[in-house]
Image (tube, coloured by chain):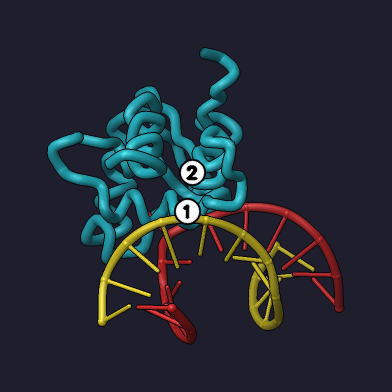
Chain colours: A cyan, B red, C yellow
Amino acid sequence: MNGFFSRVYEIVARIPEGKVATYGQIALLLGEPRSARIVGWAMRAAPEHLNLPCHRVVNKLGEMSPDYVFGSSEIQKTMLISEGITFKANGCIDMKKHLWNVLKL
DNA sequence: CGCGCGGCCTAGC
DNA sequence: AGCTAGGCCGCGC
């Protein structure tokens, strides 16, 4: 709890509806620009009861997580759509529109 | 205690 | 524009 993971969870918990963040972005916020992968691990290990919007965390291309995460990428896609996220023709999130800009806080 | 693998990223071809 | 090759850090075996 104490450490990287907790901090990751705090950040993720603050991602507003209709916005998404990238692993690298979160890692950067923690002052560890090279720990993007650990963020991914943290998501996997994320306890359910925290109700983290881990579906709002994607890679830099705006792609869905692999099927083994949410069951299928369609599920994640659906959740995001219901929050107002829009997708491009190639099936990726329109990052330009929905990428969470922390500086706006 | 050591090695390998990730919900990744960046740089190069 | 799409693929390969490293790199980085923490966890599991």
Rounded to the nearest whole Å, what is the CA distance between mark 1 and mark 2? 6 Å
Up the image or down, A31 lies above or below A36; here it is: above
Amino acid at the residue labelled 1: Glu
Mark 1 and mark 2 residues within 8 Å of each other at the beta carbon:
yes
Query: Which residue is rendered at x = 26% and y = 36% of the image?
Result: A52
Query: Which residue is rendered at x = 50% and y = 38% of the image?
Result: A26
The N terminus of chain A is located in which quarter? top left
Instruction: Let me know if residue A80 appears in the view.
Output: no
Instruction: Let me know if residue A62 appears in the view.
Output: yes
Image-based side of B13 in relation to A58, left or right:
right
Most foreground residue, A32 or B5: A32
Residue annotated with mark 1: A63
Q: 10 Å neighbourhood of mark 1: few (<14), some, or many (≥20)?
A: some
SS at badge 1: loop
Q: Which mark is residue A93?
A: 2
Amino acid at the residue labelled 2: Ile
